[in-house]
Every structure is written in structure tokens, then in C-alpha cells.
Image (cartoon, coloured by chain):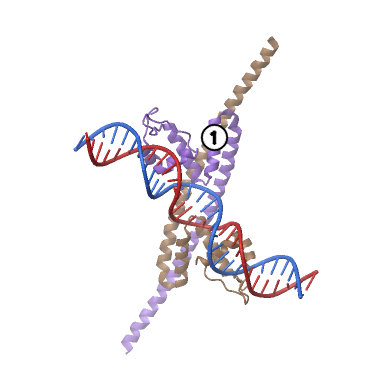
Chain colours: A purple, B brown, C blue, D red
Amino acid sequence: MENKTYTIKEVAEKTNLTIPTIRYYETEGVLPPVERSDSGNRVFTDSDIGWLDLICCLRGTGMPIKKIKQFVQWCLEGDDTIDDRIEMLIEHGKTVDEQLQVLTNYKAAIEWKINYHREMKMQIDARRNAVRIIEQQDLKND
Amino acid sequence: MENKTYTIKEVAEKTNLTIPTIRYYETEGVLPPVERSDSGNRVFTDSDIGWLDLICCLRGTGMPIKKIKQFVQWCLEGDDTIDDRIEMLIEHGKTVDEQLQVLTNYKAAIEWKINYHREMKMQIDARRNAVRIIEQQDLKND
DNA sequence: TCTTGACATAAAGTGCACTTTAGGCTATAA
DNA sequence: TTATAGCCTAAAGTGCACTTTATGTCAAGA
């Protein structure tokens, strides 16, 4: 499973990122420098994909690129940054909890709206039905 | 509770939106036109705040401004759009479920990372401690 | 009466995270 | 050998959702 390598296209498929996004992450220093072939093409390893998975996780939970870069840099710097890293992860975990809380509340509000609209629809349909019946009776009476 | 009115500042405080954002929503047609005083100032009602709460809910769950505008316009158009509105809410509800799912998975990944880093820290500390002890012994032996 | 503060508009600017474009290199297949 | 596909870079462009700026009106208190 180790020492297998991937082209940028394969990595894009694996990570659901676009090719330009992967390149962008590397030039921005969010993704650590990727190995190159003799002709200058990127040669990705499972480790690189691991970094990208981490980046996706942090981005997907709303962490800005700059902060992710900071975290990755700390990882590369080694042992001395372990406390900073743990602190950042814990703080970020808290914001994710908040996001989950907010999202859950909004979800409930949307469900409420849906039910409200459904009841509204029932009444509209009932009214329309009543009008139809009256019209039919008017037709007969003419 | 009804027929009370609010200034834009009060509404901003109530909704946690900024004053320019509220104006922006109105000029964009996301928020239906707000009543004005003789001097042209906006006079908000509880109904307006209700619209803003809805907008916050939809924005907070990732619906783009354009789509929210569409939904609000449908609401203003009346009964004939009830099916469209219900469909949009249901579809949006699904995307919120997906967001919750993704976010929950990411949260778990972050927790996993935290634990991984904590164990890493334990090892680093243990190693440092060992080095310290050895250094002290070396000191004694000199 | 004058100043202060809250409101108004229109238009330009901002920040973020990419995406697109233009131009060029290189290895394989026809 | 030539064309095609896949990679490369640097730089400019994009889309979204606001935010900021410049300028002006209006009502109330000193």
C-alpha cells in the first residue's frame, strides 16, 4: 500500500479536488512540496493524499486557508509545536460543535417551515375544491 | 407584540446582521420592501424581522442569495407558488442533512487527530524526560 | 441656530478561495 | 515525425456576499 505513486489527475479523483486547486494548495504552502519527476511533473504519494485529506477536513469545517497553512507548517516543524497544534485542533473542534448546533437548529426551523407550508397547501386545495364544487352547482342551476 | 416598529439599528441588533447587510438585502430584493417614515427612514415591523430570520436560516445553511430571493418572491406571489416553495424547502432540507452528515464525519476526524496528537505529545514528553534524567546522571558522574 | 447622530443612497472596494488563460515542455502512439 | 494528451508556470480573472466610502437629508437637544 505504501510507496505507490499517483499523478495529479488521479489525486484529483481520489480527493474530489480539481487539479488547479491541488496546485494552488501547493503554491500557497498549504500542501507541503510534492516530489517531482525528471520532467518536472508532480509525483504524489499516499502521504500527500493524507495531507490533502486533512486540508479537506479543515476547509470543510470552515477553517481559512491561512490557518490550515499555519497548522501544516507546525506539523513540518516538529515536536516543539505539538502544544500549538493540539490547542488549535481543540479550539477548532469547538467551532465545529457550534456549527453542528446551529445547523441542527436551522434544520429544525426548515422542517417547521415545510410543515407550515404543507398545512397552507391543504387549506388552499380545500378552498379551491370548494370553489370548484360551487361552480359546478352554479352550472347546473343555470 | 404586533404593530411595534423598529429602527434599522434595533433590527441589526436583534438579527445579528450589520446595518449595511440589511440594506443590501432589501436592495437585492431578498428582503421585501420595508415601510418608510415621512423622512424616508426604514420602519421595520415584526414581519420584517421574520423575513430576516428566514433569510438568516437559509443563508446559514448555505443557500445562495439568488435562491433565497426566488423563495421570497414566490412567497409574495401567493398561493400558486406553494408547490414550488415546498419543493425548494424539501430539497434544501436534504442538503442540510448532507451538511450535517459531512460535518459530523469531519468532527470525528478532528477528534481522532486530537487524540493522535495527544499520544504523540506523551511520547515526546516521555522522551524528553528520559533525556533529562540521563543528563542529570551524566552531571553526577563528572 | 447650530451641531450632533442616525438615517439615506450610489458606487466603488474588499476578501476569500479558487478558476481560467496563455504559453510552453515532454513522452507515447499512429 | 508529428500530433496528441497530460503535465507545467505565472498572471490575470471570477463569483459571491458583503463592506466601505462619499455625500447628503433630517429631527432633536444645547
Residue in the picture at 59% in, 32% down: A81
Can residue A110 be seen in the rendering of this structure?
yes
**Residue A98 located left or right of residue A120:** right
Looking at the picture, which amino acid does disc 1 mark?
Answer: Gln
- The quadrant of the rendering that contains the C terminus of chain A is bottom left
Q: Residues within 10 Å of mark 1 (few under 14, many from 20)?
A: some
Circle 1 residue: A73
Residue at disc 1, secondary structure: helix
Above or below, comparing residue B74 to residue A23 in the picture: below
Above or below, comparing residue A10 to residue B12 in the picture: above
User: Looking at the rendering, which quadrant does residue B134 occupy?
Assistant: top right
Residue B128 rendering spot, x and y as whole percentages: 62, 23
Residue in the picture at 43% in, 64% down: B86
Q: Nearer the viewer, residue A31 or C20?
A: C20
Above or below, comparing residue B4 to residue A35 in the picture: below
Residue C12 rendering spot, x and y as whole percentages: 54, 60
- The quadrant of the rendering that contains the N terminus of chain A is top left
Residue B27 rendering spot, x and y as whole percentages: 52, 67
